[in-house]
Image: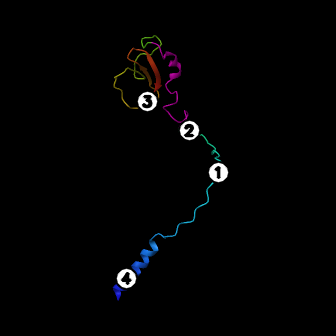
Amino acid sequence: MKNTFLAVVAGVALMACSPSSEPAPAAAPVEPAAATPAPIEPAPPTTTPATDPALADTCNMAQYAALIGKPATDAGVPPASATVRIIKPGDQVTMDFSPTRLNVDVDAAGIVTGVRCG
């Protein structure tokens, strides 16, 4: 008797879970809504020159910006020292950041390609 009862309950559960044989009513066609673009707000800056030491001119790089495009042997290029690094392709440099140190990047032809603090 117990097995019959379980079989009936299982059969009812299966009938409840099975799809009906009647077709579902057709949904009314949906009209596409007029697309209105959402207002786009600019993302806030992640860093500002006043707070990011890598972007601040703490090594007076602005006075050396005119050297970009000139030979590294130009008289205006400061000599390498404790506060100036001349970095050529393949040179190994430390990864420490010194805000008062001037990095002068030079390409393989000996032309200054950039100046930055660090």
| Distance of label 1 from label 3 (alpha carbons) | 57 Å
27 left or right of 6?
A: right
Query: Residue 68 location, x and y as percent?
Result: 48, 17
Q: Amino acid at mark 3?
A: Ser
Closer to viewer: mark 4 or mark 3:
4
- The residue at which mark 3 appears reads as 98
* Relative to 42, residue 18 above or below: below
Disc 2 element: loop
Image quadrant holding the C terminus, namely: top left
Query: Would residue 52 be counted in the magenta stretch?
Result: yes
Q: Amino acid at mark 2?
A: Pro
- The residue at which mark 4 appears reads as 6
Residue at 40 percent of width and 18 percent of height: 107
- The residue at which mark 1 appears reads as 33
Answer yes or no: do the residues labelled 3 and 2 have beta carbons within 8 Å?
no
Q: Earlier in the sequence, mark 4 or mark 3?
A: 4
Residue at 45 percent of width and 72 percent of height: 17
Q: Amino acid at mark 1?
A: Ala
Q: Earlier in the sequence, mark 1 or mark 3?
A: 1
| Distance of label 4 from label 2 (alpha carbons) | 66 Å
- The residue at which mark 2 appears reads as 45
| Distance of label 4 from label 3 (alpha carbons) | 79 Å
Query: Residue 91 location, x and y as percent?
Result: 34, 23
Pick whichever, 37 or 5, lies toward us.
Answer: 5
